[in-house]
Image (tube, rainbow, N blue to C red):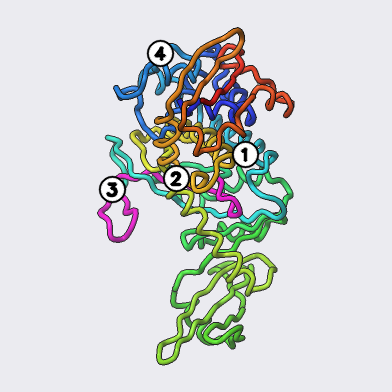
């Protein structure tokens, strides 16, 4: 029942136009099957068609269907689109979210990070360790870019084992840069991005800068320990020098920090950047924002970024791209919820709101009427969703739901 709360948010995001534009062949049915995949992502479940616990009529109805799509039909429509098609879908959604204020105002501070997902594919694959203390396993490589002010994802890309981190990252940056245009952005990266190819990309860019930690290799360690440091407060000092990759003529800015404690050895860390911002600001205020991308994986991973049952790149890319639409709608819904509900994880939101709301569905004239009983009170839904069709019209958004045969939606609370 709670999935109906996402319908107004899909209308505000232009979700149907995005999905219908992606699956334009074959009429509206493929797009409605795609809406089922979006709803599955919102519920944080995979292969929902195999579960007996979901009400057939209730779940399928919100997607404009009278049935639950089979695995074969879902795979077929996803496999019918290319990786490029799904990239275009992400770019279009990114533009909409940017106009809707999902990424904050002013200069963009972005975080990029490789995110490795365990895969149950039967294909022969290179096995990787997600963490040093874990055994090697089949892994799908994803590469995300998130806004650090709001924690929201801009885009992601996938790669097979043959593509390097640099190649996949540059592909992701091209996608994000194509939407940002000449808008200034500072990208916060990880040690895995410490390559000449990535630094050359940012050194040539007039709109994007990068800040990343440098690995503790011998050449860098010897250089930063010999610098003259400027103490900012007791036990913490910074210094700067230049750094060049081997066989490169580019001189890059290397910032080092030294942490000292009485009776202990100094601890050195270094960062490479193309930004001209103050070193203290970059290290103490800006770079800590990078951890918002880790929070995103922890809070939103259950929507489809913590599992990969197949390694068909275009199929997985399509499924996870559609999950971005569900995540964007859930983000809008959270903004209408009071604390602590607004800070729930995706799995908790699914359990407490989308699947456990008590209610009633009926049709009257040209409207689908959703009635919620009691559960809505602690969530404060009445104030935000009462007379929702009129609210949408006031926002210059048509209240007619295209994938539900142009019915309008009304909520009642008892």
Kindly report which numbered mark, 2 or 3, lies closer to the viewer in this rendering.
Answer: 2
Kindly report which numbered mark, 4 or 1, lies closer to the viewer in this rendering.
Answer: 4
- Is 145 included in the stretch rendered in magenta? yes
Q: How many marks?
A: 4
Q: Secondary structure at mark 2?
A: loop
Q: Secondary structure at mark 3?
A: strand
Residue 208 spot, x, y in % from top left: 67, 55
Q: Quadrant of residue 54?
A: top left
Report which residue position mark 4 lands on: 67
User: Could you give the CA–CA distance between mark 3 and mark 4, rounded to whole angstroms?
Assistant: 36 Å
Closest to the observer: 139 or 41? 41
- Mark 2 Cα-neighbour bin, 10 Å: few <14, some 14–19, many ≥20: some
User: Could you give the CA–CA distance between mark 2 and mark 4, rounded to whole angstroms?
Assistant: 29 Å
Q: Which mark is residue 94?
A: 1
User: Could you give the CA–CA distance between mark 2 and mark 3, rounded to whole angstroms?
Assistant: 27 Å
Question: Residue at image x 61%, y 54%?
Answer: 149
Would you say the residues marked 1 and 3 are in contact, meaning their CB atoms lie under 8 Å apart? no
Report which residue position mark 2 lands on: 345
Report which residue position mark 3 lands on: 137
Which portion, as a residue range, is magenta? 128-152
Q: Quadrant of residue 86?
A: top right
Question: Residue at image x 67%, y 39%?
Answer: 100
């Amino acid at each position: 029942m709670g999935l109906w709360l996402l319908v107004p948010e899909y209308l505000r995001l232009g979700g149907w136009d995005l999905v219908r534009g992606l699956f334009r062949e074959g009429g509206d049915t493929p797009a409605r099957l795609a809406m089922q995949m979006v709803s599955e992502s919102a519920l944080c479940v995979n292969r929902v068609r195999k579960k007996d616990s979901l009400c057939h009529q209730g779940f399928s109805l919100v997607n404009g269907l009278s049935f639950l799509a089979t695995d074969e039909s879902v795979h077929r429509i996803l496999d019918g689109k290319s990786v490029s098609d799904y990239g275009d879908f992400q770019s279009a959604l990114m533009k909409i979210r940017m106009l809707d204020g999902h990424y904050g105002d002013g200069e963009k501070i972005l975080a990029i990070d490789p995110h490795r997902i365990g895969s149950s594919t039967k294909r022969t694959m290179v096995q990787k360790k997600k963490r040093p203390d874990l055994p090697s396993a089949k892994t799908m490589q994803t590469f995300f870019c998130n806004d650090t002010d709001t924690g929201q994802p801009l885009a992601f890309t996938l790669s097979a084992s043959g593509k390097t981190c640099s190649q996949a990252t540059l592909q992701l940056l091209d996608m994000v840069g194509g939407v940002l245009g000449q808008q200034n952005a500072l990208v916060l990266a990880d040690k895995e991005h410490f390559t000449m190819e990535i630094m050359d990309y940012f050194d040539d860019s007039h709109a994007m800068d990068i800040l990343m930690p440098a690995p503790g290799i011998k050449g860098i360690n010897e250089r930063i320990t010999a610098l003259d440091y400027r103490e900012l407060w007791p036990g913490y000092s910074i210094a700067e020098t230049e750094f060049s990759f081997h066989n490169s003529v580019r001189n890059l800015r290397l910032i080092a920090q030294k942490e000292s404690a009485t009776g202990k050895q100094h601890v050195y860390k270094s960062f490479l950047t193309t930004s001209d911002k103050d070193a203290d600001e970059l290290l103490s205020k800006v770079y800590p924002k990078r951890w918002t991308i880790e929070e995103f994986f922890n809070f939103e991973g259950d929507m489809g970024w913590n599992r990969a049952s197949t390694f068909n790149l275009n199929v997985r890319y399509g499924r996870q791209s559609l999950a971005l639409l569900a995540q964007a709608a859930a983000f809008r819904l959270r903004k209408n919820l009071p604390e602590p509900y607004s800070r729930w994880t995706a799995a908790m939101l699914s359990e407490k709101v989308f699947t456990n709301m008590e209610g009633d569905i009926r049709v009257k004239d040209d409207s689908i009427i959703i009635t919620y009983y009691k559960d809505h009170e602690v969530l404060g839904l009445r104030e935000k969703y009462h007379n929702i069709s009129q609210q949408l019209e006031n926002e210059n958004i048509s209240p007619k739901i295209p994938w539900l045969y142009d019915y309008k939606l009304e909520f009642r609370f008892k």
